[in-house]
Amino acid sequence: MMTALKLFAGPRAYAQIRHHGLAPNDVSAVFGASGAAKWLTIYGLDRAIFGDWLASTSHPVDLFGTSVGAFKLAAAAQRDPAAALAVLAQAYITQQYVGSVTAAQIALETRRILTAFLPVEAVTDILQSPRYNYHCASVRCLGMLADSRPAAQKVAMLKAFLLALGGRKFHQRTFERVIFHSGTAVHDYAGRDGFVTRRVALTPDNFVPAILSSGSIPVLMPGVTDIAGAPGGVYRDGGLLDYHAVPTNLAEIQQGLVLYPHFYPHIKEGWFDKFAPWRKVTGRQLDDTLVVCPSAEFVKSLPGGVIPDRRDFSKFQGDDAQRIRRWSQARDQSLLLGEEFLQLARTGDIAGRVELLS
């Protein structure tokens, strides 16, 4: 029988889970990574966690995400998370583009997705939620990255790539982190990694622009401006800085564990770190974190043996039907991840399955 899930934990989380198992009340935060279509691989895991496992709890839980991670957590924070996640997944899968894909087309499709799973009443529910404190992060662009011209943005991204070879700190003149938040957070997300980090309270007026900015990919999408309550400037994809957001970069985790449903068994801090395989997030940086992800065996069972990817738009250009079939199958197969997680939680076998992050 296929083992669909892998579980990796930082030292403190590992010790706690090995000795006491994992209960919903142990979790104080859930993080969601950027990754576009990759999220479909763990749709079923998110649905089981929010629609079932955490549903019976009443303690406050922080949600923190960037890009598609921010989208899915906005669905998860709604009154019926399973239904909202299903709408989000279907809306995401059914994106279609005619001819050459333009920034304007991508912006229109993104707004269609937001409208589908995030109606006005859902925004109100998230802002007034007694259980979830919602956070999404964007970057406020500095220098040429704030330019509206795609050519200038390409130059800025190339410069940022070269700077990234020297380390994250060299991006401090490229962008600032802005955290949009609701509720009274369990942890103080003020930024602990040297980047200017601003906090902006979410309201009915700025919620959609904020979450849209969190997923606005440079060059491919227009930046977002004039976000109510936020400093002036151009806001773009939060994944540039917090691609797979590292909890200890953002806050000191003083209580509870961070649950991290993820499509990979590893964490990449920023988008540019994808191109630096030697740069890895250590177990110590994830001391309080449990990463739950698909096994290599499960990934091999997906269509083509790979995780869905934004590059599939190019790969299957002119054949949206095939891409939609493959992405739909990946979403449907991901339900196995949720079933296995719930079984491990019910039996207590999580303690025996968890592995220590090095």
Image (spheres, rainbow, N blue to C red):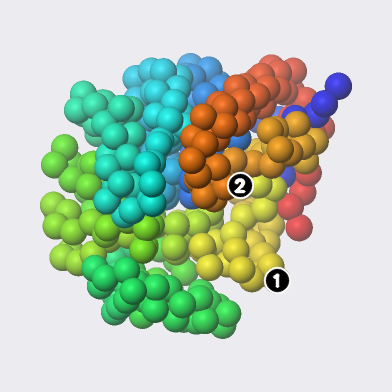
Which residue appears at 23% of the width and 64% of the height?
234
Residue 173 spot, x, y in % from top left: 36, 80
- Which of the pair 103/137 is nearer the observer? 103
| Distance between mark 2 and mark 1 Cα atoms | 21 Å
Q: State the residue position of label 1.
A: 278
Question: Tag 1: Cα neighbours inside 10 Å, few (<14), some, or many (≥20)?
Answer: few
Q: Is residue 245 left or right of residue 203?
A: right
Q: In the rendered image, is residue 35 in sight? A: no
Residue 80 spot, x, y in % from top left: 38, 18
- Where, quadrant-wise, is the C terminus in this rendering? bottom right
Residue 263 spot, x, y in % from top left: 62, 42
Q: State the residue position of label 2.
A: 289
Question: Which secondary structure, mark 1?
Answer: loop
The amino acid on which the numbered mark 2 sits, given as a three-letter code, is Thr
- Which residue appears farthest toward the right when viewing the image? 1
- Which of the pair 334/80 is nearer the observer? 334
Q: Is residue 261 above or below residue 225?
A: above
Q: Is residue 199 left or right of residue 1?
A: left
Residue 252 spot, x, y in % from top left: 48, 56
Q: Quadrant of residue 236?
A: bottom left
